[in-house]
């Protein structure tokens, strides 16, 4: 059976430090390229940090048509895997929790998070669900909390995708994080079973300000079972051969 190699990065959390996040991403992309990955996923809000307060989010937000974002693309790898990366976008004055799809330094498209938590009031909700293709693999994107809504995954399936890409950031208050530690994959697995799609997630790890994130970064099969997963609490690169 033909396969395509996909990858996801479990990363430290970068906040308000785009140069450091970019340097880390370039290094990880080089490792993914060396292992033959065609697709590489980074966490939610990876580039500027998961900034949910209006002032810092707006200060660091990027217009995807701006010279500032063009400079980011200029630093992106010009070879290797297609990259899905979370960032904060501004368009027509509105902020969005967005995942961009970049192929060798070229912006292919973007997905804006459709289902927002109460703490994400700074963002506007997205309303489209584009499907992308790399190496014969069609995929769509759900960002973190989107995965709690069957209709979000159903839109990806309806676009003819075989894979849901899930950038996530589960940096939570410790008590909440403890409660959810073993529940992320089962919750996402429900969406796999409903749609018959594979899923790959990428999350952050670390601790700050009484909050903690352990991951998980994982691949789930269409039955909702874990096909591969990185160890919790450790940065790393998950590489998996997905059947086409």
Image (cartoon, rainbow, N blue to C red):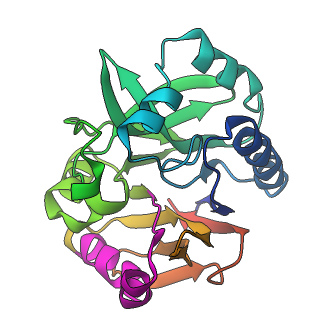
Q: Is residue 84 left or right of residue 176?
A: right
x, y (%) of residue 158?
20, 48
Quadrant in which residue 203 is drawn: bottom right
User: What residue sits 18% from the left and 63% below the top?
Assistant: 149
Q: Is residue 143 magenta?
A: no
- Say if residue 205 shows up in the picture: yes
| Viewer-proximal residue among 6 and 217 | 217
Find the magenta span and give its range.
167-193
Going 19% across and 36% down the picture, which residue do you hit?
Answer: 127
**Left-right relation of 24 to 4:** right
Please identify the quadrant where the N terminus is shown: bottom right
**Coordinates of residue 140 in the picture (x, y in percent):** 37, 47
Where residue 111 sits in the image (x, y, percent)? 36, 37
User: Viewer-proximal residue, 218 or 222?
Assistant: 218
Question: Going by the image, does 47 lie left or right of 163?
Answer: right
Report the magenta stretch's main SS: helix
Q: Can residue 117 be seen in this view?
A: no
Above or below 161: residue 171: below
Q: In this view, does 170 lie to the left or right of 217?
A: left
Asked if residue 65 is positioned above or below residue 96 in the image, the reply reads above
For image coordinates 66% across by 84% down, the residue present is: 231
Is 114 above or below relative to 227? above
- 166 lies above or below 22: below
Residue 87 percent location from the top left of the image:
50, 39
Residue at coordinates 57% horizontally, 48% vertically from top-left?
A: 46
């Amino acid at each position: 059976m033909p396969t395509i190699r996909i990858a996801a990065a479990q990363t430290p959390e970068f906040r308000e430090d785009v140069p450091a996040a970019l340097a880390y991403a370039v290094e990880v992309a080089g490792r993914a390229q060396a292992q033959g990955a065609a697709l590489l996923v980074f966490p939610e809000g990876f580039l500027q940090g998961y900034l949910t307060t209006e002032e810092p989010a707006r200060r660091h937000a990027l217009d995807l048509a701006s010279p500032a974002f063009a400079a980011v693309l200029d630093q992106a790898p010009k070879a290797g895997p297609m990259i899905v990366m979370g960032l904060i976008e501004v368009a027509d004055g509105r902020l969005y929790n967005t995942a961009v799809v970049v192929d060798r330094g070229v912006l292919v498209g973007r997905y804006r998070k459709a289902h927002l938590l109460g703490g994400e009031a700074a963002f506007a909700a997205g309303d489209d669900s584009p499907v992308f293709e790399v190496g014969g693999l069609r995929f769509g994107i759900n960002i973190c909390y989107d995965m709690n809504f069957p209709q979000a995954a159903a839109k990806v399936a309806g676009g003819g995708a075989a894979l849901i890409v899930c950038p996530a950031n589960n940096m939570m208050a410790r008590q909440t994080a403890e409660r959810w530690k073993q529940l992320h994959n089962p919750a996402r697995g429900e969406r796999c079973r409903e749609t018959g799609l594979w899923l790959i997630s990428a999350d952050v790890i670390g601790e700050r300000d009484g909050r903690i994130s352990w991951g998980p970064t994982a691949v789930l099969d269409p039955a909702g079972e874990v096909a591969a997963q990185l160890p919790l609490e450790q940065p790393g690169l998950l590489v998996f051969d997905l059947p086409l």
